[in-house]
Image (spheres, grey):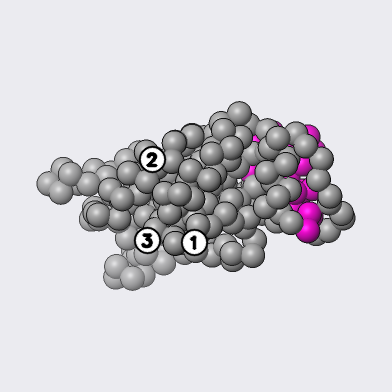
Amino acid sequence: MNDFLARAPVGITAGLVLALAMTPSAADELETVRELVSERFAEIEPRHVSPSPVAGWYTVNKGAIVAYISADGRYLLQGDLIDLELQTNLSEEARNQSRIEMMSAVPRESMIIFSPEEVRFSVTVFTDIDCTYCRRLHSQISEYLAQGIEVKYLLYPRSGPASDSWVKAEQVWCADDRNEALTLAKLDKPFETHSCDSSVVSQQYAMGQDVGLRGTPAIVLEDGSLISGYLPAIQLAEALAASSAK
C-alpha cells in the first residue's frame, strides 16, 4: 500500500481518461473507475473503490488508507475529507468502518483473550512481546479486567520477520496455554512450547499494517477508532464509555 501512496500523483493514460469520459451512467462510471484503479495499482481491488460524498469523486479505501480519485481518472487526492456542516471527519469514519470489518473477521480462536467475568467493553490490542509499553499494559491486565474490559490480543512483532520478537510471538502461539505463555514471555521467563503452524503471526502482522498502527501497543475500540500507545485502565474505560455513548 505504501507503493500505492508513493505512485498516487502519477497521471492516468489518455485512453483510460477518454473511456471514463464516455461512461453513460453513474453505475458504468463507477465500474470504469474501479477497473482503472485496480489496473493501475495492483494492491487495490475493485471493491476498494466506492462513491464518495462529493459529486465527481470516488473513494479508494483499503484498510486505514483512504484516498479520493476524480471521475475522469486524472486526479488522486490523499487527505481527510471534512464535512464542515456536520463537523465530521468522513475519512476517519471510513477508516473506523474498515477496522470494524477487519476485527470482526478475526475468529476468537485466533486471538489471545483475557476476559473478565462480566464484559462491559471489548478492545483488540496489537502487542509486541518486547515493547516496553506493551509490557506495562499487560502487567496491569487485572486492572483492565476490573474495569470490565475484555482484552483481545493480536501478535504484532514490530521488528518484523526473523527478529527475536517474531520468534517469541511464534513460540507463544505454539504454547498449550497461550495466555500463560504471553504473560511469561513479557516477563522474560521460560514457558513450554512446541512446533506448530504459526502462520497466524504473519497474518496478524499484515493486518496491523492495514489497520494503520504507528506503534505498539495499538488499541482498536469497538467503534473502530484507534488509540496508538498505552492507556491506563481507568482512562481506557472512560474512552470506551464515551465512545459507546455516541
Q: Is residue 18 left or right of residue 164?
A: left
Q: Is residue 160 left or right of residue 10?
A: right
In x, y percent, where is residue 76?
39, 43
Residue 145 visible: yes
**Residue at the image position 57 percent from the left and 33 percent from the top:** 136
Q: Secondary structure at mark 2?
A: helix
For marks 3 and 2, the one nearer the N-term is 3
Residue sticking out furthest to the right? 195
Q: Is residue 147 above or below residue 163?
A: below
For marks 1 and 2, the one nearer the N-term is 1
Q: Is residue 46 left or right of residue 17?
A: right
* Residue type highlighted by circle 2: Ile
The residue lying toward the viewer, choosing from 205 and 168, is 168
Q: For marks 1 and 3, give the CA distance.
A: 41 Å
Mark 2, residue position: 234
Q: Which residues are magenta?
A: 156-176
Q: Secondary structure at mark 1?
A: loop
User: Splitting the image into 4 quarters, where does residue 52 fall?
Assistant: bottom left
Q: Are marks 3 and 2 in contact (CB under 8 Å)?
A: no
The residue lying toward the viewer, choosing from 180 and 24, is 180
The residue lying toward the viewer, choosing from 167 and 28, is 167
Mark 1, residue position: 117
Q: Is residue 58 left or right of residue 135?
A: left
Mark 3, residue position: 50
